[in-house]
């Protein structure tokens, strides 16, 4: 019988990879809640129209990458390719704006895009992110960027660069878009096929071209910052000022536009040179128009998302292994019940314990305890049981001593 395997572009997260995932998730939860963000979980699929309107029909995500299907009620359903549009839908549908002035959310879950699978990029991938609704101050933009950077820093990831830009408002982008198209149309013969297609449908994506970025006509393209209105430029300058307050170093990148249409004003990415072409680890920005587009509410918003798989690649061995604290080696069938009671007593007091369920010899026990890198090994044989003691071996010092069974908990704690 043929073995059924995981679908291409998906993978099991097991073993050491699972430990990394839990570690990243736990650090995110603790840090985001310190900033008063609340966890939210949205459905894994939504009406297709949500993503078409929210992300933009001319984006690569909507045109090429979405998993869309008809359900049994003949409704068009899409597995979420990102979570911001879903959170906006959740925020609007539940009228959270009527209950609080500012809302802070964080999330953690699977997203789906039909892309070519490669290192750090799968068709089912996991994202962690935060969103803030109801505040347009540049202080929030800077804080969101700072949270993203400090989150990665907390995980022990170094050699990161923060890149920032402003893509202005719809009005200023309209003026800029005309100048951009005018510039690139004079270089059509030198442009890649994708950009020849983008020039009419989504001109801002020309700035994100990986093929032409080193060519002179690309480098001489108009700078979007020069087309910002006065209030937009002030917002951008204030974001930079508050990044200095938070102690975040940054680089201004006028070609940074992000891949989704809903962004306005501040956009940013945190990148590394350790992942090759997949150098973006975390990215986001402000999307003040999205709530009006999806729910006719003039409510500002800003946030970021980060790919968990890419963070896992960057962690290397720099994460807690979550090994047991104690290994219990019981010798002889008569000792098993007492050994299990000791294990439960320790576990009830938040001490991680490993105990085997089948009998084995001392040599096998020691070999396994060593492999698990435990701190203590409790040895319980017939002689020890009769005396009401255990032998406690400290693997850090290799010392061994007798401890009364009723005192083992206090001794280890």
Image: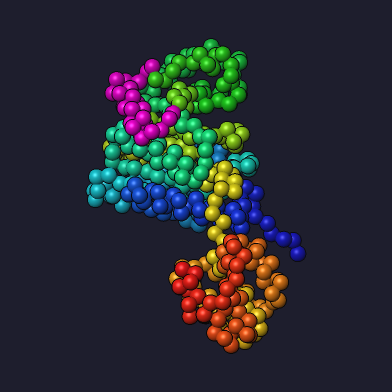
Residue 295: % across, % down: 32, 42
Q: Quadrant of residue 289?
A: top left
Assign the magenta stretch its main secondary structure: helix
Whether the magenta-drawn stretch holds residue 141 is answered as no
Residue 67 visible within the image: no
Residue under the point 52% across and 80% down: 405
Report which quarter residue 175 is drawn in: top left
Give the residue at the far top of this rendering: 186
* Residue drawn at point x = 24 percent, y = 50 percent: 99
Who's the residue at 48% across and 42% down the image? Answer: 152
- Quick check: 274 above or below 155? above
Q: Is residue 21 above or below residue 183?
A: below
Left/right placement of residue 49 relative to residue 366 reads: left
Residue 227 belongs to the span the image colors magenta: yes
Percent from the top left, x then y, of residue 277? 60, 33
Magenta range: 226-250
Position of 170 compared to 363: left or right? left
Where the N terminus falls, by quadrant? bottom right
């Amino acid at each position: 019988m043929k073995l059924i395997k995981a679908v291409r572009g998906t993978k099991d997260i097991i073993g050491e990879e699972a430990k990394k995932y839990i570690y990243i998730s736990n650090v995110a939860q603790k840090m985001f809640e310190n900033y008063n963000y609340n966890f939210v979980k949205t459905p894994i699929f939504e009406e297709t129209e949500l993503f078409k309107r929210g992300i933009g029909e001319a984006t690569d995500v909507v045109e090429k990458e979405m998993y869309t299907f008809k359900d049994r009620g003949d409704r068009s359903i899409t597995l979420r390719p990102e979570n911001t549009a879903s959170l906006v839908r959740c925020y609007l549908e539940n009228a959270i704006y009527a209950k609080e002035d500012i809302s802070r959310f964080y999330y953690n879950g699977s997203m789906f895009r039909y892309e070519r699978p490669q290192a750090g990029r799968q068709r089912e991938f996991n994202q962690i992110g935060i969103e803030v609704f109801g505040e347009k101050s540049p202080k929030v933009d800077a804080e969101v960027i700072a949270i993203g950077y400090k989150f990665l820093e907390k995980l022990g990831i170094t050699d990161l660069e923060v890149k920032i830009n402003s893509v202005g408002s719809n009005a200023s982008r309209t003026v800029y878009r005309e100048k951009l198209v005018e510039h690139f149309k004079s270089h059509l013969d030198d442009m890649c096929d994708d950009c020849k297609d983008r020039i009419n449908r989504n001109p801002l994506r020309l700035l994100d071209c990986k093929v032409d970025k080193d060519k002179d006509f690309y480098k001489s393209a108009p700078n979007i910052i020069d087309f910002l209105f006065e209030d937009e430029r002030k917002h951008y300058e204030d974001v930079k000022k508050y990044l200095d307050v938070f102690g975040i170093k940054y680089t201004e990148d006028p070609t940074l536009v992000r891949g989704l249409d809903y962004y306005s004003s501040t956009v940013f990415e945190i990148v590394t040179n350790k992942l090759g072409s997949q150098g973006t680890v975390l990215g986001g920005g402000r999307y003040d128009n999205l709530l009006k587009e999806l729910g006719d509410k003039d409510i500002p918003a800003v946030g970021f998302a980060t790919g968990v798989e890419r963070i896992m690649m960057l962690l290397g061995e720099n994460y807690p292994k979550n090994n047991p604290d104690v290994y219990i080696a019981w010798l002889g069938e008569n000792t098993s019940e007492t050994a299990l009671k000791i294990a439960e007593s320790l576990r009830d007091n938040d001490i991680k314990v490993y105990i085997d369920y089948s009998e084995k010899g001392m040599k096998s026990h020691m070999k396994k305890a060593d492999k698990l890198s435990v701190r203590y090994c409790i040895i319980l044989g017939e002689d020890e049981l009769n005396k009401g003691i255990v032998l406690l071996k400290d693997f850090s010092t290799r010392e061994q001593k007798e401890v009364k069974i009723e005192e083992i908990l206090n001794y280890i704690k």
